[in-house]
Image: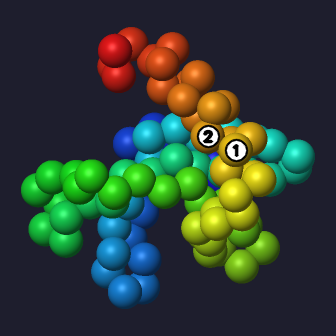
Amino acid sequence: MTFKKYDLITFEENDKVMVLAALEHEGNEYVFVNEVLPDESDVTDLYKIMVVHYEDGTLERVNDPELLKVLGPKFQEILENDPEFN
């Protein structure tokens, strides 16, 4: 399963995020997500980069500063080249 732009993901705690972009890096899939209000009426100003763990069906927030330095510009390039975000 691959995540696509605008996929809505609901976690067990009922927190929700919307996928804005996805990419593969060193054999892992990462998603850039925007948190969504609980009633799904709007998005928030909170963004995260998360790694997808298909083996157990979970997503984990990326906190490693070195990895964020690599992934951040890659997601920025994807979004800058997306006409919907320009």
Q: Residue 25 in the image: x percent, y percent?
A: 80, 43
Q: Quadrant of the image for the C terminus?
A: top left
Residue drawn at x 61%, y 40% is 72
**Above or below for 58 versus 24:** below
Residue 7 seen in render:
no
In the shown orientation, is residue 78 left or right of residue 37? right
Residue 73 lies, in percent from the top left, at 63, 32
The residue positioned 42% from the left and 85% from the top of the image is: 12
Q: Is residue 19 above or below residue 52?
A: above
The residue labelled by disc 1 is 69
Q: Which mark is residue 72?
A: 2
| Residue 81 in the figure: left or right of residue 84 | right
Q: Amino acid at mark 1?
A: Lys
Asked if 83 appears above or below 8 in the picture, the reply is above
The outermost residue toward the right is 26
Secondary element at tag 1 = helix
What kind of element bears circle 2? helix
Distance from the alpha carbon under mark 1 to that under mark 2: 6 Å
Residue 76 % position (x, y): 54, 29
Q: Is residue 35 visible?
A: yes
Q: Are marks 1 and 2 in contact (CB under 8 Å)?
A: yes
